[in-house]
Amino acid sequence: MFVYLSCVVLLLVGIYCVAVKKNLIKIIIGIGIMEYAVNLFLVILGYRQGGTAPIIQPGAANPILVDPLPQALVLTAIVIGLATTAMMVAIAMRIYNCYGTFDITKIRKLKG
Amino acid sequence: MINFLPMFVAVPLGAAFLMPLLYKIDRRLTDLLGNLTTFYLLAASLALYFFLPADHLMIYRVGGWAPPVGIILVLDGLSHFLLLTVNLIAALATLYSISYMNLYTSRGKYYTLFMLMVAGMNGVVLTGDLFNLFVFLEIAAIASYALVAFGCESEELEASFKYLVMGSVASTLVLFGIALLYGLTGTLNMADIARSLPANAGAARALITVLFLMGFGMKSAMVPFHAWLPDAHPSAPAPISAMLSGVLIKALGVYALVRILFNVLGMTPQLSYILMVLGTLSLLGGVLLAIGQWDLKRLLAYHSISQIGYVILGIGLATPLGIMGGLFHLFNHALFKSLLFLNAGSVEYRVGTRELKEMGGLAKKMPVTWATSLMASLSISGLPPFNGFWSKLFIILACVQAGRLWFALAAVIGSLLTLASFLKVQKYAFFERLPSRLEAVKEAPWIMGAAMIVLAGLCLSVGILFPYLITFLVNPAAAAVLNGTGYSRLILGGL
């Protein structure tokens, strides 16, 4: 139970970072933390105490196997996270070229 | 039975990767391939009506694996309804792009992103697997983040970053919800989850519901999760604005929310009340913020929030009439809101501004744009005989029928305020005196005009022939929603 709760705490740290920080780069890092919290949660879901890799060998006694599905999900989620992060960093760079700052309180051409 | 469900994802995905190659040969080829793809998809989603079995259900097993082990693509009434809406608007938006994209460079990249977005949306509405839904949702969302920033002006980048941050937080929350559901049930197939969700998981079920409500609420821009939409939608090129407001928020937001809440988790009276309150907040909040806007596309974007409010209110009632009205309004909103964004694009193409104060007297100079925009304005304000009138009428009647008189009153007030704000658009953009520097303005190119005329014709003909449309299109979709968690029996059968 404690490990699951620690994932939630990590998720909240990420949300705090996204909501409170004023720097574009720190916001990107916050989203990274949120994604890692969910990925960690998925990996822990699949873990079994004393489990081994899920390869069934003929003749071997029924071993405890970890659940392979969440690992596949996490791989996909990491790739998607990579695409999102690359997109965010690219846009942050273009914003820096346009506005000359990473401070979101100064990037305010849109309002209303 | 011919089963071509995977084509809806595979064809636009393939087209997306061919675009940069074709762009090297001749940039006109990308126009051709883009239009061929979307019109093929539209024809295919119409043709599906002739291949459907009587129970309006079609299942494709990816890789031949049976559910719940393998991933399945499911076409039921609701999926088919959304599929048709997405591909109809996509076809007209690509037609419009042929001329409109002269304003921008790198057409090849534009069509690549457009096709990826269409593939993602088709995947979201077709998939029967929860994690697969997340992947397709991200494909469509990442393509749309890039399309919002397509002009690379400072405002567009700012809007795109805001959209990216909100969208990524939403996706993370959705993924967390999916992880929790997997932990509870040990499966990712939506029908299997509905079947094996333990009845005593009260607290976990509530947490999952809240996570999905926040995640998909942000994607569909309900108040109070709406802050990104009025920045992001106006910043994109006009055909993309039409796609984003017309179908993206519905396929990624409303459809996914409705599918999961009704068919997977099961609807409860409390949840229905929450949806109704969120819907009413959106429909009043959106329209109140819209009235004060002077940027034409920004005003339209606020109206998208308001009209999504109607859809959520109707569906949230969870009565047969309410769900039918909500889904019908979803289709109608796709028609008239994409038309309005295309009109705004034509004005921007010829006049070069989106500020209402700098326009005036365009009715004489741009008759096609004016006439179609008038029809769209009457539709969105809910005047007979246009399509918006009927769907709003159904939603208001459903509120009265369910005894929710205050919600019905809010819907009526929202409709009147919509009318007021579109009178403002008509007055400042198309009537009044023509400023002398706009004397040389011409009508938009004929291809753009053709796309607008088709949409306006659809608005009018749906308004006149609505009983047929409801019988053939909306009722099967409403039946799929009303079926609730009976969805799992339908998909898995005797398994």
Image (spheres, grey):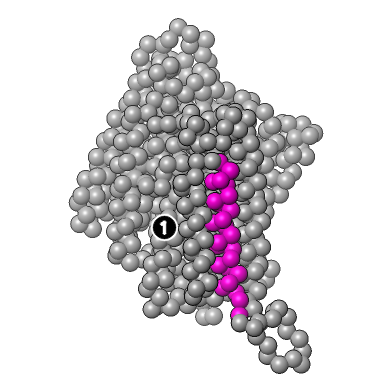
Q: Main secondary structure of the magenta part?
A: helix
For image coordinates 39% across by 78% down, the residue present is B199
Image location of residue A109, percent across then percent down: 48, 28
User: Taking the image as drawn, is residue B365 in sight?
Assistant: yes
Image location of residue B209, percent across then percent down: 41, 63
Work out whether residue B12 or residue B54 is closer to the camera in this orientation and state it.
B12
Image location of residue A13, percent across then percent down: 50, 56
Is-magenta flag for residue A28?
yes
Q: Quadrant of residue A35?
A: bottom right
Dividing the image into 4 quarters, which one contains the C terminus of chain A?
Answer: top left
For image coordinates 44% across by 65% down, the residue present is B208
Q: Quadrant of residue B283?
A: top left
Residue under label 1, please give it. B213
Relative vertical location of residue B12 with respect to residue B239 in this rendering, above or below: below
User: Taking the image as drawn, is residue B8 in sight?
Assistant: no
Residue numbers of the magenta segment: A24-48
Image location of residue B229, percent across then percent down: 45, 40
How many numbered marks appear? Answer: 1
Relative vertical location of residue B450 with respect to residue A76 in this rendering, above or below: above
Work out whether residue B471 or residue B440 is closer to the camera in this orientation and state it.
B440
Q: Amino acid at mark 1?
A: Leu
